[in-house]
Each structure stands twice: as structure tokens, then as C-alpha cells.
């Protein structure tokens, strides 16, 4: 039981590039979310999903897309990277209790 | 939407003292309140949670209290130890279709001095 697995752990992008952050969970959790954490700030919700095929926007969705084709996977796509998207990204999943977080992806956009 | 306010932003205590962190929430539909601990460079980890039908919950040195009427909940850590030093986040979730929206407070940096 690996929990929530995020890849990659580190990534450097050039402005304007696109990429996908991967997130997979093996706990059969219905709920999955993506957060970003900037220095000195808390965790801000980007997008979330309440089940396969169902996604919704969080607090800071602009510049990001998500899809949930399976229960296990919830990838986050950066459409055209900007320096303001430099952050640590966490994926999390839950059944009906507390969320379990992945180890994070540290993204730098130059 | 839900708004969670957390205080204080920093808290410094001596080893063995108690620490209290307080949060308020805005959405009366919120019914689940977890607390997370995040060590430097690590992921947030759930340390305790409480549901709206319970007023208090304890787990060894950690306790959480909830006042639904006042819309506030608190984390209490007794007999603090240096390894309790971390950032602590409170959070709130509303039920039903909003269950996926976990809203966090701004965090409290707890420092426990030996």
C-alpha cells in the first residue's frame, strides 16, 4: 500500500512550457485534491474531484487543468507555465475522513 | 465559500508547557475539522480530527475541542516536546457535495525550546 504517489519530486520549467504533475493513490479513495503551497503561506486548493469523471475548481484554478478518468489517478496539467506558478504542489486523497497527502512536487518556473 | 482563520501565526513555548492554537470557520455547514502537522520540507500529516457531533477528542498529549455555536475549534498540546516543533494547520470541510473542498487555515509555527 503505497498511499499517495506524486511524480516528479522536482521539476524546472521554462516560461510557456506545459507539463503534467502525476498523482496516483491505491487506497480506493473517492476524493482527490491538488494544493499549492507557497513560502510563508498555507495550502491553497487548486482543483478537486469527488469521484471518477467529476472535478471542480478550488480557490486558485487559473492556469491549471485536471481530469479524473479513473479512481486512482488525478493528474494536474499546467497549460503554459508562468513564474507565479513556482510552488510546492501536493496531491491528497480521502474516503470520508482526513486527507492523506503525497510527498509533493517542487516546481520552479524560470 | 468556507473561510478558516487561524491564530496565532507563531507560538513559542518551553518544553513541558502547553500550547493552544485556535481556529474559526465561517460556513455553518462544515462538519469535519482535521488538524495537520507539517515538518520542514515534509508533507502535511493528519494528527487528530473532530466531527461536528462531538465536542472534544483526545489522543495522548493532543486534544481538539469544537464549539459549533461560536464556530471555533482549538488544538491543545500538553507536555510539549522539541519534536512537536512544526507548522500546524487547521482545516474545515463541509458535507455533501462540498466534501472535496478542504479549506485550510494559514498555519501556526510552533517552536518548543528545550
Image (tube, coloured by chain):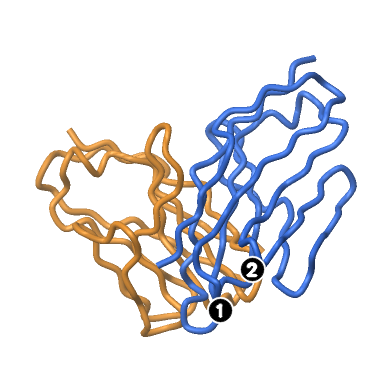
Picture colour for chain A: orange
Q: Nearer the viewer, residue A20 or A46?
A: A46
* Res. B78 image quadrant: top right
Other residues around mark 1 within 10 Å, as few (<14) / some (14–19) / many (≥20):
some
Chain for mark 1?
Answer: B
Chain for mark 2?
Answer: B
Q: Position of residue A11 (x, y in %)?
A: 31, 40
Q: Position of residue A6 (x, y in %)?
A: 46, 54
Instruction: Give me the residue at 43% from left, 71% from top.
Output: A73
Pick whichever of labels 1 and 2 is earlier in the sequence: 2
C-alpha span from label 1 to label 2: 8 Å
Picture colour for chain B: blue
Q: Secondary structure at mark 1?
A: loop
Of all residues, the one furthest to the front in this rendering is: B70
Instruction: Give me the residue at 61% from left, 62% from top.
Output: B71
Of the 4 image quadrants, the one containing the N terminus of chain A is bottom right
Q: Position of residue A27 (x, y in %)?
A: 62, 71
* Res. A19 image quadrant: bottom left
Residue placed under numbered mark 2 in the picture: B32
Residue placed under numbered mark 1 in the picture: B95
* Res. A66 image quadrant: bottom left
Amino acid at each position: 500500500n503505497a498511499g499517495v504517489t506524486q511524480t516528479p519530486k522536482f521539476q524546472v520549467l521554462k516560461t510557456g512550457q506545459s507539463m503534467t504533475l502525476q498523482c496516483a493513490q491505491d487506497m480506493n479513495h473517492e476524493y482527490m485534491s491538488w494544493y499549492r503551497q507557497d513560502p510563508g503561506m498555507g495550502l491553497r486548493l487548486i482543483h478537486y474531484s469527488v469521484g471518477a469523471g467529476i472535478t471542480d475548481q478550488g480557490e486558485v484554478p487559473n492556469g491549471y487543468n485536471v481530469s479524473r478518468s479513473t479512481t486512482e489517478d488525478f493528474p494536474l496539467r499546467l497549460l503554459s507555465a508562468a513564474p507565479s506558478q513556482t510552488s510546492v504542489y501536493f496531491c491528497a486523497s480521502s474516503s470520508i475522513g482526513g486527507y492523506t497527502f503525497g510527498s509533493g512536487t517542487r516546481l520552479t518556473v524560470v | 465559500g468556507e473561510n478558516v482563520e487561524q491564530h496565532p501565526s507563531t507560538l513559542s513555548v518551553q518544553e513541558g508547557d502547553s500550547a493552544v492554537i485556535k481556529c474559526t470557520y465561517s460556513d455553518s455547514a462544515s462538519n469535519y475539522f482535521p488538524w495537520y502537522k507539517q515538518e520542514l520540507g515534509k508533507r502535511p500529516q493528519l494528527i487528530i480530527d473532530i466531527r461536528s457531533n462531538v465536542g472534544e477528542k483526545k489522543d495522548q498529549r493532543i486534544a481538539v475541542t469544537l464549539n459549533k455555536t461560536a464556530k471555533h475549534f482549538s488544538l491543545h498540546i500538553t507536555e510539549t516536546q522539541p519534536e512537536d516543533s512544526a507548522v500546524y494547520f487547521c482545516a474545515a470541510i463541509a458535507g455533501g457535495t462540498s466534501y472535496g473542498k478542504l479549506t485550510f487555515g494559514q498555519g501556526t509555527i510552533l517552536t518548543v525550546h528545550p
